């Protein structure tokens, strides 16, 4: 049964203090265009990812030494740069740690092929993000999704954080391993998951059902968790497309979690089902 539409959004995720909702265009905000990844962890994991098509590596001498094994494995010659005049087209506030890699966005394939249950994994777990635009939050969600074994993180192609250097750095390498699927329509993707046998549970702070009880109903079957955008929560159509709505119990009526923290709690509950 579908839960009734509640009056207020889920755990009321908010933007983290002062961070921009969208990255500077120089980091690769254009959909489908090359991406500038930066930071030692993000660059190292991209160099070691055979699925990542690499174009250009800029590094200080110190960073190149730290990345020596990954550079050798990737077979790419770095452009050695002065840290004081770092030439990569990054936001001036980016903490690049002396390393930046221009690369093509990753292609994780289609939703059905990536998320379909199979004999080896009959009860996969996926995460749905409804218009989550902060790349730092999405990067943190990808890290949690990798830790708890989610098959994929799914977001709409529009009004969601694209693959950028800021997102990759926040993910601390998880972007290279955790599928991040962008779909044309989130509600249709949810329906496609339901046709594959998924139970779809949306997080909503006004729901009567607690998350542990909601995911217990998916024991032995595929499960999709839907989380709403910073400040707005799940949109009405997304809520209506869920099989159940559930809340994360809080000690206070005024307590709330941002979307990345709520995702980690929900994923933990789901992993224990």
Image (cartoon, rainbow, N blue to C red):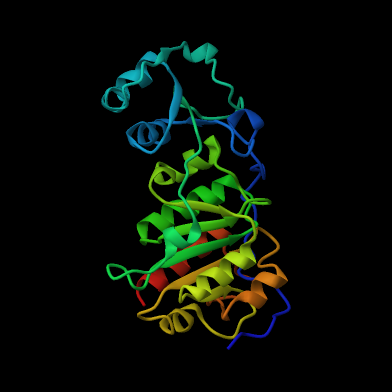
Left or right of residue 120, residue 94 in this image: right
Looking at the figure, which quarter contains the N terminus? bottom right
Residue 213 place in picture, x, y as percent: 46, 84
Left or right of residue 173, residue 153 in this image: right
Name the foreground residue: 189 vs 210.
Answer: 189
Residue 238 place in picture, x, y as percent: 65, 70
In the image, what residue occupies the spot 70% across and 81% down? 5
User: Can residue 212 be seen by looking at this rendering?
Assistant: yes
In the image, what residue occupies the spot 41% across and 31% down? 43
Q: Residue furthest bottom?
A: 1
Query: Number of labelled discs?
Result: 0
Residue 81 place in picture, x, y as percent: 46, 12
User: Can residue 250 be seen by looking at this rendering?
Assistant: no
Q: Is residue 66 above or below residue 152?
A: above
Residue 189 place in picture, x, y as percent: 57, 65
Q: Is residue 200 above or below residue 183?
A: below
- The image quadrant that residue 70 belongs to is top left
Looking at the figure, which quarter contains the C terminus? bottom left
In the image, what residue occupies the spot 58% across and 25% down? 90
Left or right of residue 48, residue 258 in this image: right
Q: Is residue 230 above or below residue 51?
A: below
Name the foreground residue: 168 vs 8.
Answer: 168
In the image, what residue occupies the spot 30% across and 19% down? 65
- The image quadrant that residue 259 belongs to is bottom right
């Amino acid at each position: 049964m579908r839960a009734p539409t509640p009056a207020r959004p889920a755990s009321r995720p908010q933007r983290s203090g002062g961070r921009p909702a969208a990255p500077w265009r120089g980091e690769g905000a254009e959909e489908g265009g090359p991406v500038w990844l930066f930071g030692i962890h993000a660059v190292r994991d991209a160099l070691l990812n055979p699925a990542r098509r690499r174009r250009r590596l800029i590094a200080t001498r110190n960073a190149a030494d730290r990345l020596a094994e990954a550079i050798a494995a990737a077979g790419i010659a770095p452009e050695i740069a002065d840290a004081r005049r770092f030439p990569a087209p990054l936001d001036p506030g980016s903490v690049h740690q002396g390393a930046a890699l221009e690369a093509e966005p990753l292609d994780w394939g289609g939703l059905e092929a990536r998320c379909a249950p199979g004999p080896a994994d009959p009860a996969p777990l996926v995460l749905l993000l409804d218009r989550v635009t902060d790349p730092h939050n999405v990067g943190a969600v990808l890290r949690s999704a990798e830790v708890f074994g989610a098959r994929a993180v799914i977001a709409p192609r529009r009004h969601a954080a694209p693959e950028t250097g800021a997102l990759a750095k926040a993910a601390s390498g998880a972007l290279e391993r955790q599928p991040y699927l962008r779909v044309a329509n989130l509600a249709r993707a949810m329906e496609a998951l339901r046709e594959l046998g998924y139970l779809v549970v949306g997080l909503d702070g006004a729901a009567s059902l607690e998350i542990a009880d909601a995911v217990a109903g998916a024991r032995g079957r595929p499960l999709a968790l839907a989380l709403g955008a910073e400040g707005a929560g799940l949109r009405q159509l997304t809520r209506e497309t869920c099989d159940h709505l559930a809340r994360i119990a809080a000690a206070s009526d005024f307590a709330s979690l941002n979307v990345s923290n709520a995702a980690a709690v929900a994923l933990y509950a789901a992993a224990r089902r």
